[in-house]
Amino acid sequence: MTSAPAPIPDRQCPRGAPLPPRRRGSRRHRPAEGERFSRAHWRRLLGTALLYFVLTIMLILFMTPVYGAIVTAFKSQAEVSAGGYWTIPTRFAAENFERVLDPEDGNLGLYLQNSLLLTIPASLFSIALGTLAGYGLGKYSFKGDGLLFILIVAGMFLPPQIALIPVFRLMNDIGLYDTLWAVIIIHTAFGIPICTLVMRNFFQVVPNALREAALIDGANEYSIFFRIMLPLTLPALAVLATLQFTWIWNDFLWPFILTQRAESRTVMVGILNLTGQYTVDWGGQAAASLIGSLPTLFIFVFFQRYFIRGLTLGAVKG
């Protein structure tokens, strides 16, 4: 008994037999390796060029006001009236900076001092309370914790303009109107929701095994928070410190509403005082704006090592 012949492989026929017809469209044109590399290379090059073009346009849009403020700060009032805000000054003079810093004229030094006395405590209080609330809501489960978190975060969606009249009457009734403490309290209250949200998301990412291991080793809750958890939050705290300092320092609404005397006003409200009844000191306002923007610039440079890394912390779990 003989075995069956082996099957003939595809595309192979006995010698002399015609090949089977090739199916239509069975082979597609494949670009050569160099052609594919060329197309990918040009796509990447075009995308990079488009990205840099958009970034350049954005840079020009953002830097145009800065350029106008810098050149105006070195002009006299007559030169601003004659040549506008965008022309290069014929002579770079520092009279505007000297005038706004003069206690008898611009008194910008007092306004800078008041801004520091307002911004530093308000930032510290809001970040400290937000960190404690975020730790409690992120690491402990209790009845109503979700509702409590929603009530705290809901303060982020409250427009400050709605609370102007109630807050004004409250501060006037308790005797804090026209003091920096009134502005400190309101900025602390409005800063707690965002600080709580950021810190809660961060603490939820921190593994619970760290806290459980510390409890097994005999550490109490205060030691766990201050010696283990708090050092891990430095990037998130740097982000909150930068944002809170910038928001409070640049705020104009609440210092304008809750203060009246020049001794209690901040730098943003003080710049407004450089406007007269019939004229505007454009050079002085530009110089004061540049000086007033330096503290926020220093804060960002100081915390920039943690800022970008801290922005993404708590964004995802796991």
Image (spheres, rainbow, N blue to C red):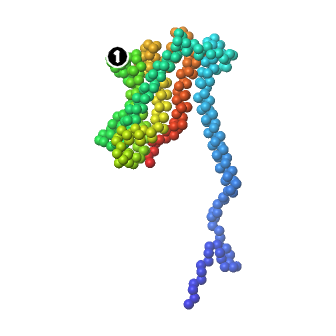
Q: How dense is the environment of label 1, judged by Cα within 10 Å: few (below 14), some, or many (20 and up)? A: few
Which image quarter: residue 89?
A: top right
**Residue 297 drawn at (x, y percent):** 55, 28
Q: Seen in the image, is 87 located left or right of residue 310?
A: right
Comparing 300 with 197, the one in front is 300
Quadrant containing the N terminus in the rendered view: bottom right
58 vs 5, nearest the viewer: 58
Q: Which residue is mark 1?
A: 175
Q: Position of residue 154 (x, y in %)?
A: 37, 33
Q: Type of residue at label 1?
A: Gly
Residue 313 at x, y = what percent?
Answer: 47, 41
Task: Say if 188 sits above or below 171 in the image.
Answer: below
Residue 144 in picture, x, y percent from top left: 30, 40
Foreground residue, 230 or 156?
Answer: 230
User: How many numbered circles does the render carry?
Assistant: 1
On screen, residue 51 versus residue 175, left or right, reads right
